[in-house]
Amino acid sequence: MMSKRRDVLLGGLALLGAGTVSNPVFAAASYFAGTAIDNGVTFRATNFAMIDKRWRRQVVKYFSSEPIGTVVVDTRNHFLYLIMENKTAIRYGVGVGRDGFKWFGRATVDQKSLWPRWTPPADMRKRHPELPEFVAGGSPKNPLGPRAMYLHRDGVDTGYRFHGTLEPGSIGKDASSGCIRMFNEDAIDLYQRCPIGTAVQVLPHIADQAPEVSDATPVE
């Protein structure tokens, strides 16, 4: 890994990276449709009828030298790939870090949390003094959503996570403080598929050979 990338990655130690904005809970109502229940918590379900098909979870052809089970994030094109057998991958649309908060490199999923509590880091609270000291897991104002997968490097927490979002409209955009945002349903799905120790590679972009959306297979 280039030293510059290493510096950027380690610089994330001070960030939780949830990408909170001033009023994240007030996402456009049209992005939600009804509610769902997960582990006793009721949350607003994503209205996928309002979501561009490119960002929906689907199985695609994927050619990579990375081992099966590796997660690869293409930040430029806003996709997360979970590599599977037979040269395929599950592709998820994601939101990534906005300018000044992007990072690249390798990590591992060393911790996972179901309905995680969110504690804004000190630097974020300086930028947004209106933020609380913490938001309880399962709260409708918790920007991590139903799941968080914590990314570590060489045993050290990078401060970055894969997690859900209060803002489905931010998927496919540069919107966070460095974390990788997912639709809440996709965060639940990825959580189930990624055991502790899952290898992660975050790239500026990749020369993937995935088919067009019309040729892809949706993942239920």
Image: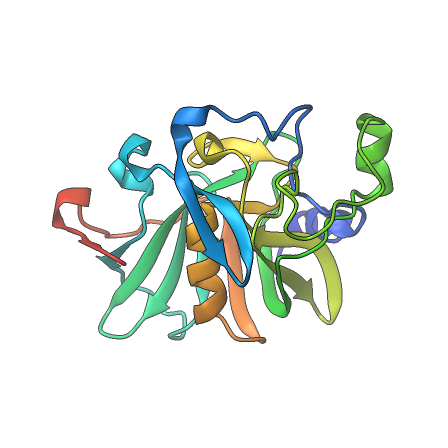
Above/below status of 135 relative to 169: below
Q: Is residue 180 left or right of residue 6?
A: left
Q: Say which of 59 and 86 sits in front.
A: 59
Q: Is residue 45 left or right of residue 11?
A: left
x and y, in percent, of residue 80 in the image: 42, 52
x and y, in percent, of residue 205 in the image: 43, 45
Above/below status of 87 relative to 33: below
x and y, in percent, of residue 218 in the image: 22, 54
- Please report the residue visible at 55 percent of the width from the left and 47 percent of the height from the top: 180
Q: Quadrant of the N terminus?
A: bottom right
- Please report the residue visible at 24 percent of the width from the left and 68 percent of the height from the top: 87
Q: Quadrant of residue 84?
A: bottom left
Q: Is residue 90 visible?
A: yes
Q: Quadrant of residue 121?
A: top right
Q: Is residue 209 left or right of residue 198?
A: left
Q: Say which of 34 and 81 sits in front.
A: 34
Q: Is residue 73 visible?
A: no
- Please report the residue visible at 52 percent of the width from the left and 32 percent of the height from the top: 174
